[in-house]
Image (tube, grey):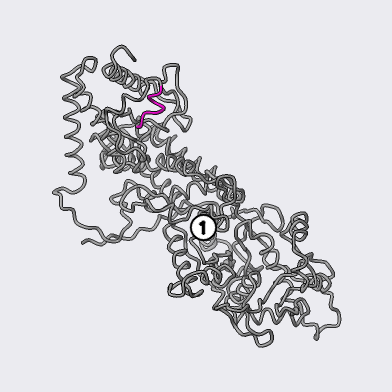
Amino acid sequence: MQRRRSYSAPRPPAAAPSEALHLYNSLSKKIEPISYSASDNGNKGIAFYTCGPTVYAPAHLGHARTYVCLDIVRRVLEHQYAQHRGGSSNSTMPSSPVPPPPLFVMNVTDVDDKILATAAARDETDSLSSPLALARHYEAAFWSDLDRLNVLRPHVVTRVTEHVETAILPYIQRLVDNGTAYCATSGDVYFDVRAFEDRTNARTRYGKLAPPVSATDFYSRLDQTAETVKRDPRDFVLWKRRKEGEALFWTAPVWGEGRPGWHIECSAMIQAVQEQFQQTHRFVVHAGGVDLQFPHHTNEIAQAEAHVLPDLDNVTDTTLPVQEWIPHWIHTGHVHIDGLKMSKSLKNFVSIEELLQDDNPSSLSSPADDFRLWCLGMSGSYRGPATYSRDAVSQSSHVREKLVRFLLDGERWLSQAGDGGTKRWSERDVNFMQLANDVVARSNSALSSDLNGSLFVKQMTRLAEAGGAYLQTTSPSDGPVEVVRSAIRILREQLGLVGFSDATTRAGMASIVKDTMEAPSNVVGGEQALLEALVSFRTSIRRSALTHVSLDDAPKALLDILDICDQARNVTFPQLGVELLDGKEDAQKEASSWKYCIPRVSVKEAEGSESVAANATLPNVRLKDLTNIPLETLFRDGPSYRGQFSAYDELGVPTHYVDGTEVSKRQRQKLQKKRNIHAKRLQAAAPGQT
């Protein structure tokens, strides 16, 4: 067993240090820069708080989109901080303090109504019938999901259960002491919205993040009968008195047995972390899904601003201006499925585990990277809604394949060039290098401009397509290797910058296996030698059949053999992550008749095979079953073609692929031949009919 080396993405190309990340601020409703420093004298770094999961069920793709998008934000911030720090340290100007790197904090809500209810609904013999055991189980699953999505873990994690006595109870007591909270007749403790507004002389209104219309609608729907214990319908609970049978509770010195309300948790834990890191950091950014904006984040702000007010016993003027809390608020949009918001309560969610169930770490496939690409550039703005479907993520896979294709072909081109070839640059080489440098500038600018992921992906695709065209028109012996090497490096680094995994960033390198251990091969020469032998065997059979017999009068047995060869090319090998070329590329440019690809059911370049199902739901279609497919619908209903094309000519021959690109003239000629073969098959099965 040979241990693999760990790999970290190369350092991305430098962006201008002055180009800070600009993101939409839900509080000010403007796009604003996020400074590298959280203090005027530059000695404090920014702290970034993200609302984490409530751990009572598997995390779904709505959660995943939020955490992937915020992970990209984090990576861009850290990259730009590194550039800023490097720029400061290399400056010839008098040195200025460099703040410490950003601090990322996330909470875990491990006590909640839903956690208690889910645990109570389980059989008492179930190990997860304990609320804490249930919470720890789903918390572990959550971190595993984030790891598999390649989302960086936070620097600091705060659990509610670990902060009740040391942070949350004292925080509530402070609100009671300064007159902005009260204990109701029910035994619950509530935040007093009217008292907060009175004490601040309405200078800071309650509901900063809540549009007035939404707030009105929300409160008008409240059951006023159930709200009689409140002084105001807007009041929200800070401490919930324990109900009979509840298994998880704490004892408050004044209010008795109970547990924290949801909104108070984040405010108190942020305060606790702030006190621990007060010498080095200050919270500048708060993030979460848009569904938390109101009332959760609205209530967080009110609590935090009330918390700094002095106690009533210590002041004569009870109406005081309040301090602003966290200045920048980031919210990610909902994910919808079948027209509804994806959520646990509606039970219409796709779990992260389901998304990643087909992940094969020993191949170029990566559902996590396909999903990241969808989140980044193909689901709309990070702060807008997105509609999830398997087809949408499948389209992301096709785009990622373009990027990976250039990395694979570029590395093969470099291996063929070796250290030979010309070192003299032509105008073509200079133009390609200038394009690559332009891609870096434009893609970095796109990320800085409110995380314009769509433009970033377009720039990556632009580089990959230009690189592919360069490789097609330049022999390894004719072009300088430096220009290809530089373009590959840029693409790898930019993809690494936004968090793509080794399956994408290392495509074409010596190995892309993610596991740390590699088993030795039992085949002499290893995987590549076996592939060479299999491909050569198939090529020999196919060449022999095509050489010695005319397809116009070929017997059915020969057609069957050719169909089997096509099946291997169009389905079997692509499913394994291998693309057969069958002379598509000039022999001078292609050393072998195959190359690695992202594993897939069918390939866009497929010539077609009427004998096999490209659709996984039809794995056992046999040759004789093809006689049931009419000639005019062959390319719509034929199992090898289903779902590949979107437009056809008057004969039913495809003119456009499903992604809208045009079928090449050469490919249409091949499809026409396949149509002719199918016509003969139908005629043989039913003489006199076509």
Asked whether, in this view, residue 257 is left or right of residue 430, the answer is right
Total labels: the figure holds: 1
The answer to whether residue 311 shows anywhere in this view is: yes
Q: Quadrant of residue 482?
A: top left
- Residue that numbered label 1 is attached to: 71
What crowding class fits label 1: few (fewer than 14 Cα within 10 Å), some (14-19), or many (20 or more)?
A: many
Q: Is residue 17 magenta?
A: no
| Quadrant the C terminus occupies | top left
Front-most of residues 375 and 244: 244
Q: Position of residue 85 (x, y in %)?
A: 53, 62
Asked whether, in this view, residue 206 is left or right of residue 687, the answer is right
Residues in magenta?
633-639
**Direction top: furthest residue:** 688
Front-most of residues 614 and 454: 614
Q: Position of residue 156 (x, y in %)?
A: 52, 71
Question: Residue shown at 38%/44% (left/top)?
Answer: 488
For residue 441, above or below residue 192: above
Q: Quadrant of residue 49?
A: bottom right
For residue 24, above or below residue 108: above
